[in-house]
Image (cartoon, rainbow, N blue to C red):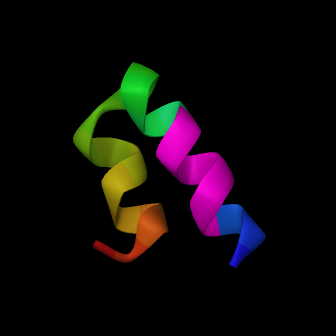
Amino acid sequence: GQDGFLAARFAERWGDGAGRWCGG
């Protein structure tokens, strides 16, 4: 969903942390 997209963007900063939000 949209949350996954945002998490992907943040993943660049947080790293693996946001990876879980993306669901993979």
| Image quadrant where residue 14 sits | top left
Residue at 56% from the left image edge and 50% from the top image edge: 7
Residue at 54% from the left image edge and 34% from the top image edge: 10
Q: Position of residue 15 (x, y in %)?
A: 29, 33
Q: For the view shown, which residue lies furthest in the right direction?
A: 2
Q: Position of residue 6 (x, y in %)?
A: 67, 49
Q: Position of residue 11 (x, y in %)?
A: 42, 37
Count of marks placed on residues: 0
Residue at 49% from the left image edge and 48% from the top image edge: 8
Residue at 55% from the left image edge and 37% from the top image edge: 9
Rendered view: 11 above or below 8:
above
Quarter of the figure that contains the N terminus: bottom right
| Image quadrant where residue 16 sits | top left
The answer to which of 8 and 16 lies nearer the viewer is: 8
The stretch drawn in magenta includes residue 17? no
The stretch drawn in magenta includes residue 6? yes
Q: Is residue 23 left or right of residue 15?
A: right
Q: Is residue 13 left or right of residue 6?
A: left
Rendered view: 20 above or below 6:
below
Quarter of the figure that contains the C terminus: bottom left
Q: Is residue 20 left or right of residue 4?
A: left
Rendered view: 7 above or below 22:
above
Which stretch did the figure color magenta?
Answer: 4-9
Magenta segment main secondary structure: helix
